[in-house]
Each structure stands twice: as C-alpha cells, then as structure tokens.
Amino acid sequence: MEQQGTGGPASGEALNRWALTADESRLFREYVSAMVFNGQVTADAAGLNTIDLYVLNLLELSGEVSAGELARRTGLTTGAVTKLIDRLVGAGLVFRRTDADDRRRVRIGIVESAADERLGSAAELFAPIASRLDRLISTFPEAERRVLMDYFARAAEELVEATREIQAAKRTVRIRD
C-alpha cells in the first residue's frame, strides 16, 4: 500500500526487498547523512579534505599501515592513495617508510607532534560529536549499550565489505550537465 503523495510504501511497510520499513530506512539515511556532513564540517574546520581527515583517524586507530592496506580500507585506487600520502607527507602530518620485512612495501604512520601541533589531538578535533554521542549513549541502560556497540562493530564490518564490493565492481557514477 502506498501513502498518498509520497510515491512510496506506507511508513510501517517493508521497503522493496529489504526488511526495513520506509520510516526506518528514512531515519537511517538521515543518520548516515548527518554523519557524513559532520565529517565534512570537521575536516573543513581542520583545514583538511574529508578523506584526509578519515585517513588520519584510521592511522590513529590502527597505527602504521601499508599503502596497500590504506587502499583496501578506503576503497581508493593505489594511484589515489599515492597522491593522498604525498599530500599528507607534504603537509608533515604522516611519514612514509620502507617496511623492514619487505622493502617493496611502504608503511605510513602519523607524525604525532606535527599532527598535534597543526590539528590538535583527535580528541579535541572530534570533541563536539564525541561528547554529544557519549552523553546520548550513556543514557541507555547497559544491556542496550551492548546492543549499540555490537551494532557499531558489525556495521563497520559491513561498511568495509560494501566498500570492497563497490571497489571490485569499479562502478563510476558521473553527473552530467
């Protein structure tokens, strides 16, 4: 059954082949958009582009990684990763070194002092969203918090897999005038 004027299913009905209702799908899409827009504004405030901000976050969480691992984790081509690394090395935010075990492999890591001096700590940079979400999540009972944390862990895995699927399909969307 379609709601009049919406062009879609009634809010309580499942949407297409997925199990989410129209309201659940809308709410989830609003959440994802809010996260993306917050990331863009946070990157702008730090004087970075969004991918640079998230790569720095990934490096802070993971420590040193290979350039190939950055390509896999971000879904970027190896050429794009090389340009990204060049940009971050040029800004003094990351270092590039040859892997001691495999001299063909390049390892990338954060230059802590430069990143802290230029951007402040990640905790400061992400403080507006982190403090708000901390307050929000802290309002949930412990059992519900475990469900939320389980969701975040599983959703992160699914997002990584979805990124790999898109990368494997090598689909390019071009906006035409």
Image: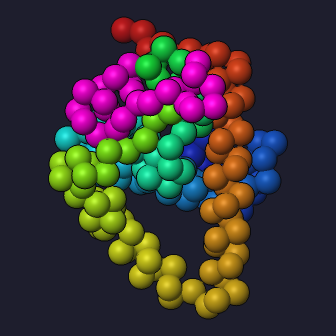
Above-or-below relation of 70 to 147: above
Q: Residue lying furthest front in this view? A: 100
Name the quadrant of the C terminus. Answer: top left
Q: Pick whichever, 53 or 18, lies toward us.
A: 53
Left or right: 93 in relation to 45: right
Left or right: 52 in relation to 72: left
Residue at position x 36%, y 35% from top? 95
Residue 134 shows in the view: yes
Boundaries of the magenta span: 83-106
Q: Pick whichever, 21 or 113, lies toward us.
A: 113
Q: x and y percent of residue 128 in the render?
A: 29, 67
Q: x and y percent of residue 96 in the render?
A: 41, 30
Q: Residue lying furthest top in this view? A: 177
Quadrant of the rendered image containing residue 109: top left
Residue 96 magenta-highlighted: yes
Residue at position x 70%, y 50% from top? 157
Residue 21 shows in the view: no
Left or right: 6 in relation to 96: right
Q: Residue lying furthest bottom in this view? A: 141
Q: x and y percent of residue 81 in the render?
A: 47, 23
Residue 86 magenta-highlighted: yes
Q: x and y percent of residue 80 in the render?
A: 45, 19
Above-or-below relation of 120 to 63: below
Residue at position x 31%, y 32% from top? 88
Residue at position x 64%, y 44% from top? 159
Above-or-below relation of 126 to 16: below
